[in-house]
Amino acid sequence: MESLSVPLIDVRLKKCLLGLLVEESDRRYVRRSVRFCCVPNELIGKGRSMKNSQHWFSRGVAALATVAMSCVLFTVPVAVADQTAGDMTVESVTESTQSSQRDDESVVSFINTESRLNDAAPQSAADTVAEEQSMDFVVAGGEYGKDYEYTPNTDTAQSGVLTLHPSTESVTLTVSMAGSLRHQSTADSTATKDRIVVTPVAGVPANVVLKNVKINLSKDTNIDAAAFAHMSGKLNLTLASKSESKLISGSNHAGLEKNDIDGKPSEAFALTITSEGSSKADWGTLIAQSNTNGAGIGGGKDSGSSYITVAGGVITAQSYGGAYSSSQGAGIGGGSYGAGSYITIVGGVVNAQSYAGRYAFGAGIGGGAYGVGSHIAVDGGVVTAQSSASTYDAWGAGIGGGEQRAGSDIRITGGHISASGYSAIGSGYFAADASVSITGGYFADASADALPKNTVYGVAPADDCDVIANDGNDKDTYPIRVVSVSPVDFVVAGGEAGEERRLSCRGTVRRRCVIDGCAGDSSAVCGYDAHGNAARQIA
């Protein structure tokens, strides 16, 4: 590499540059920039590459330019590096303003030259990884400075931030942990200072893969931020196959936080979680947890959250109140005093809890404490939704509203569902009745009156469906199921009249089933409906 001739700046000027008009957060970069200016040419490249120096140098350019002219009255000994031999001679410079200005112009000229050099040759992702930037994460894919960047924690009480904003939809950013963490961490290589923020470019969905990312900010009360925050736009979050990621935040933030902007749900601001792999054995795992006021996935304190879809992966989302406190957020949905809406489960294994030792006020899926749970759909997957307290009471619904708030437009069309809370599916304590539609699915409701009363967790299914016993291999875990039954007329010859039972759930008696050998035999299957479902004692 061709040698560059640069001035050697006196210590007094360095102190001036670091002390005048420079914010504390900028001084780290200024210090590195001045150091870069002060080394002889032949030392550049020994122990630190030119590109690495330029990276730090460029971050201090703006601050240096701001204060350079304020130091013109200093006497500055200048060392001029001999370009041929590398020997250095020191010339005295008078204290005149003109000479000082010339020295400052030399510094500013060098700044401008190097700034243009950096602009002309931006760092690639490979350069970024090779230089081991000072963050606890490694990003594969995209380009540093264009698709993502990192702001370090110059104040040790605050967190460093990795910001992801892919410039095009074709860019996928895969985030994993660095081999050696540069900040305080636990024994299991968990980041305790750095965090991740996603701010998609307008109109461009962000495609992000998490691969064994572990962040725990819950132990540091100085950090008032979420471990992972989705701030705007659409995010497609994929779990790497067979990976396990953990996102744990402190008391006022969700583990994976997505706060409604201005308190309003927006379909343009949507989160979809899925996983690599074609089966549960290959899926990735995500554990997202808040302490007390935030949701596991969704809103932070006093915030609602909406348009969350889970399509794959093994997901545990928990608002955790601790052994001696209460949980205020939902497992998936709103934080304390926040609604949870437009939440859809179509696949994966989902365990969503509002859990505490004393009281649980949030729903498993839906609203946080004093938050409604609305427009919630379960169309598939294996779902466990709980508002649960080990010592006292749970006031939120399993699926639906938080304490003192109703559930509305809750639709279950499929999946395997286990739900528990003040109501399993519906509203929280001291709230209006919920609007619920159940047209399919398998349920872990083992109550004795489920079949006789034709209910699921005390809720009647939709008009055109019925509750029947599950005779599949998973019947011990999910003893009942809901099926759609069409009003089909049967023509039966012979036999004796059996017992009456409606063919459809519309509440009208359609036919009397007369099938040989069926009468009086409670275990016999008398016929089938239009969907091929066994229908005993059909009327």
Image: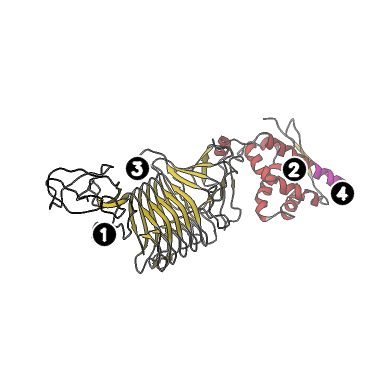
Circle 2 or circle 1, nearest the eye: 1
Q: What's drawn in magenta, residue-wise? A: 90-105
The location of residue 494, given as percent across then percent down, is: 12, 44
Q: Which residue is mark 3?
A: 280
The location of residue 479, given as percent across then percent down, is: 25, 53
Q: Residues within 10 Å of mark 2 (few under 14, many from 20)?
A: many
Say whether residue 177 is visible.
no
Say what amino acid the circle numbered 1 marks. Lys
Q: Residues within 10 Å of mark 4 (few under 14, many from 20)?
A: few
- Distance between the Cα atoms at labels 3 and 4? 73 Å
Against 225, residue 33 (above or below) is above
Along the line of sight, which residue is nearer the eye, 24 or 333? 333
Say what amino acid the circle numbered 4 marks. Thr
| In the image, residue 384 lies in the stretch drawn in magenta | no
Quarter residue 369 falls in: bottom left
- Distance between the Cα atoms at labels 2 and 1? 88 Å
Along the line of sight, which residue is nearer the eye, 500 or 184? 500
| In the image, residue 100 lies in the stretch drawn in magenta | yes
Residue 453, numbered label: 1
| In the displayed structure image, the side of residue 348 where residue 256 appears, left or right | right
Q: Helix, strand, or loop for circle 1?
A: loop
The location of residue 123, given as percent across then percent down, is: 62, 36
